Image: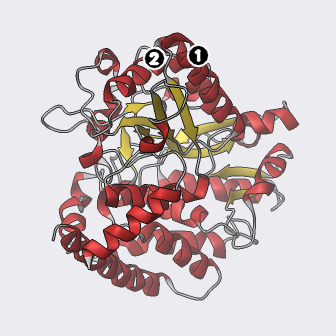
Amino acid sequence: MKHIFVLFLSLILLILPGCSSEESTADTGKKTLTIYSTMSTDSERNTFRKLAAAFEKESGIRVSIHFPGNDYENMMRVRMAANDLPDLFDTHGWGKIRYGEYTADLRDMDWTQKLDPNLNSILKNKSGKVYAYPINQAKDGLAYNRNILDRFGIDPPETMDDFIKALRTIKEKSNGEIVPFWFAGYDKSSFAQYYDQFATPLLITDPAHNEKKQLIDGTFNWSKFTYLSDTLKQMQKEKLINIDAVTAKKSQLIELMAQNKIAFTMQGGTLGQDVAQINPNVKVGIIPTPAIHSGDDPIWIGGERYTLAAWKDSPHLKEAKQFIAFMARPAHAKEMAEATSLPSGLANVKADIFYAKDYQHYQNMKVEPYFDRLYLPNGMWDVMGTVGQELVADILTPNEISKKLGREYKRLREQSETQGAENNE
C-alpha cells in the first residue's frame, strides 16, 4: 500500500511547479535554487523578490520563488512523502517538529552566532543543530487601542484578572459604544488563536500548573482546559466581546479600530500601521499575553514566523547556504524585518518596525512557542476554532467543549501514530 501511495505522490510531483529536478535543467545553463515561502502580503513578497534579484546579479545563480498560499501545507506534505523538497523552504513554526528530518544543519554559518536567544529552543536541538534561518520572529500578544486605555486611565494589563477588569471598565465608561475585546469569528482561526495563545499561561508557564508531560504522553485531563471556555463565555454574557463575534470578518477590523470602536483584539502583524494610514490619530500598541496564575509573568507567544531551511539532500546545498548567508547580512535582514513588520531573528539587527517601542519595553518577557505546535496533534487548531464558534453560538457548553477536545485529541493522536507507522514500513 505504501509503495502505491509513494508512486501516486511521485506522479503529483511531476505536475507541481518548481521541482528542483526541473529547474536544474533550465536552458540558461545556470544553477537554479527553488524556494517555497508562506509570505502572504505584497510588501513581504516584493521585498523578498527584490533581494533575490540582487543575489542573482551578485552570484550568477538563478532563484525561482514560489508562494503557494493556502496550498503550501499540502504541497509540502506531498514533497516530504516523496523526499523531493525545494532547495530552500519556509518552516513557518515547524522547523524541528514537522520538517526537522529534512533540513540541513546550518550551525557552521556565521549568522548563527547572532541568533536571538529567544529562538534557541525553537530552532536548535540539544546537540546544536540549527534547523533554519529565521527571517523574522513572531511575538504575539494582544493588540490594543492606546487612545481608549489612556482616556479611561487603564494600564496595559499583565494578568487575566486585570484584563477582565479593563474590559469591564471600557464597557462601563463607554456606555457600551466601544467593543472591549473584538473577535473576527467568521474565520474560526480567531477563536483558535484565543485558545492556543492562552493555553500556554494556563497549562505550561506556571510551575504549579505545568501539564507538559501529560500533554505529550496523551494523559492530559481536558477538564483543566475548561477555564478558557468558561472565561470566553463569561465575556460574552457580560457583553465584553462583540455581539457579532461569530460572523464578524477580519476585513472589518482596521476600519473599526481606526474609528476608536475597538479596545483589544488578538490580531497583530501590520494592524497598527494599517490603522495609522486611515486615522493617524489612533495609536495601536501590542502587549504580551497576560498571565493567568498568580505570581506568573506575561509572555510572548511565537517563535520563528518566516524562515529559510535548506533541504539536506538538495543537489545545490552549497548554493542554498550561499543564499541564506546573503539574506542574513544585517542590511538585508533589516529590510526583510521591516517589510514584515516583525523583529528580526538576529540579535544584532534592529529593525524600524511599527511595534518597535513595545517590543523594546517588553524585551525581557519570555517567548513561548505556539501551544499546538508542541503539545497537540496535527488538526487540533481547526478543532479549537470550530469549538470556539460553537461556544459563542450556544451550541456547546464549556464542559461539552472540553469533552469534544479530549475526543479529538485522542483521535488525531492515534491517526498521527498510525500514519507514522505506515511511513516507517
Q: Residue flagged by tag 1: what amino acid is it?
A: Ala
Q: Is residue 409 left or right of residue 89?
A: left
Tags 2 and 1 touching, CB below 8 Å: yes
Res 346 seen here? no
- In the rendered image, residue 126, in percent from the top left (x then y), is placed at 14, 37
The residue at 30%/78% (across/down) is 415
Disc 2 vs disc 1: which is toward the camera? 1
- In the rendered image, residue 243, in percent from the top left (x then y), is placed at 75, 72
Q: Kindly identify which residue carries mark 2.
A: 326
- Is residue 415 placed above or below 298 in the rendered structure? below
Q: Is residue 124 left or right of residue 353?
A: left
Report helix, strand or loop for mark 1.
helix
Res 11 seen here? yes
The residue at 18%/72% (across/down) is 421
Disc 2 to disc 1, C-alpha distance: 9 Å
- In the rendered image, residue 234, in percent from the top left (x then y), is placed at 58, 73
Q: Kindly identify which residue carries mark 1.
A: 54
Report helix, strand or loop for mark 2.
helix
Identify which residue, 334 or 5, lies in the foreground.
5
Type of colouring? secondary structure
